[in-house]
Amino acid sequence: MIYDYVIVGAGIAGCSVAHFLHEKDHSKSILLIDRNSDVAIGASGTAGAFLSPLLGKDNKFKTLVNKSLKFSTAFYKKIANEFVINKGVLRIPKNEEDKEKFYSYMEFNDFEYELKEQGAFFPIGSKVSSYDICKVLSKKSDKKFNYEVEHINFEEGIWAINDEIKTKNLVLTTGADVSLIEEYYFNIRAVWGQRIDVKTSTCIPFNYHKECSISVSQKIKDEEGLYLTTIGATHHRFNCDKEVCNYCLKIPNMNNCSSFGYTKEVNNSDTVKLLDLASDIMDLKDVEILNTKIGARASSVDYFPMVGKLINTKKTLNKFPYIMHGTNVQKERFECYDNLFVLNGVSGRGFVLSPYLASQLVDFMVEEKELEDEITVHRLFVKWVRTKKAKEIITKKGYLN
């Protein structure tokens, strides 16, 4: 069998792409692949899945995030309202220094808000159930779990995965692990983090965000006066070479720490840190830690996501070698890989950005609608190819024939 689409990565990005592909054409065959045992096990399973506005003066990134927030909030409520808790979020300045800047941003807000307690309350703030949302989004797709994609090859219009799974179109939503492609401009930084789920007798009426996020309470069944809440998340960039990082990222179903950067000591330290940060927001009573999760967010070097087709560096440079010296070439003329698409770099805002970006990507793949410049990979290629490091790699790899 040759699939119409294979999506590698069954987190929120991959599941969103699968959903919108089915919406466009029910007759298309779609396969979701993941090294883990189910959807939303990696970074998407670690995420607190908070939906919250981005504050600040107007800029392209803020516009993208808040446009995505409006889209995704309405989308989740439409497809799975039972897995959305829309009680609002109270955003609080981090400290006295941050306070003046925080309140100066209020005039640039894109959403209804109310000054409350020590900050600003936004009714749009929500939290979704990451696993349940991904299950809903992926329910119509074929799935292959516990499957490691070792290599991909393109021949005669067909992509082959491990020389056994074949597809007309391949979509990579692999997050921090970009080992399947050797394109150096496609630079993802793994930002590791931890979240904890706790039991507490404190009932929290809505989400809070200061230096960490605390979720609205969910009543625990059969336990009178006790509530479940999520606290997250920490941020770590470990200094290790790419080979080691890829090893860490390839550990399936990883929620227990082992002997890599995220050691037991880091885990325990992060748990203490999250509880301390939460206590700076409110006094949680009778706290019992129920669950700890770790994962790696995928962040691009400029924080914008990466969506669309991948540029083939070797073919593009052989066609336009003068790009390296600053000459502008229309992005439409770059040589791209045939029928290879990506959705990556959503960082810590995966549940805000992914549905909107997936809808845009599917429109691009199916209807050839143009993508917004700031989300394509072209911007990163142009910046990278003119650097000293790029020229060293280009020479070493023999890209210019």
Image (spheres, helix red, strand yellow):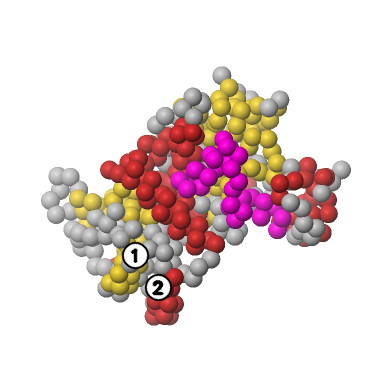
**How far across and down, in percent of the image, does residue 308 sit?**
60, 44
In depth, the one of 309 and 278 nearer the eye is 309
Q: Which residue shows up at 41% across the image and 80% down it?
A: 100
In depth, the one of 361 and 301 nearer the eye is 361
Q: Secondary structure at mark 1?
A: loop
Kind of residue indicated by mark 1: Glu
Instruction: Considering the whole magenta stretch, tell me its main secondary structure.
Output: helix
Q: Which residue shows up at 38% across the image and 36% down it?
A: 135
Q: Residues within 10 Å of mark 1 (few under 14, many from 20)?
A: few
* Residue 358 part of the magenta-drawn span: yes
Residue topped by disc 2: 106
Kind of residue indicated by mark 2: Met
Residue topped by disc 1: 112
Q: Which residues are the magenta region?
A: 354-383
Residue 341 occupies quadrant: top right
Classify the position of the N terminus by image quarter.
top right
Which residue occupies the extreme left position in the image? 224
Q: Which residue shows up at 39% across the image and 76% down it?
A: 103
**How far across and down, in percent of the image, does residue 6 sit?**
55, 31
